[in-house]
Image: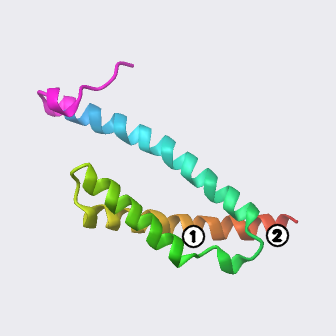
Amino acid sequence: MTAAKSPETCETMLDVRAGVDEVDRDLVALLVRRFGYMDAAARIKPDRNTVRDEVRKAQVLDNVAREGEAAGLEPARLRAVWNELVEQSIAYEATQWDRLRAEG
């Protein structure tokens, strides 16, 4: 498979779609890695009540907003996307925490 064109060099919607599909594949791979860290957190945290950490959540959202703004993106839009990602991560981690303890 050849690499997709950069956004600046796209000439057709096929070029754009190929680029979006490539980025989506990359994002899925990164999400697999991110959720692997949720598996680790579920294994490490001794108490289920610590799965949700609002202080850490706020820190993550602030970090992403700052990074996005520095790259020229809208911080509020990134916060919205990451809020959902963090909420899904918390839900996943809670499920994994329960599964690990049930397995003994």
Q: Amino acid at mark 2?
A: Ala
Q: Position of residue 86 (x, y in %)?
A: 48, 66
Give me the residue at 82% from left, 69% from top: 102
Residue closest to the eye, 67 or 7? 67
**Which quadrant is the C terminus positioned in?**
bottom right
How is the rendered protein coloured? rainbow
Q: Which mark is residue 102?
A: 2
| Horizontal arrangement in the rendering, residue 46 relative to residue 65 (left or right) | right
Q: Residues within 10 Å of mark 2 (few under 14, many from 20)?
A: few
Query: Element type at marker 1?
Result: helix
Give me the residue at 75% from left, 61% from top: 43
Residue closest to the eye, 29 or 60? 60
Pointer 2 with pointer 1, Cβ within 8 A: no
Residue closest to the eye, 94 or 46? 46
Q: Verify whether residue 7 appears in magenta.
A: yes
Magenta region, residue range = 1-15
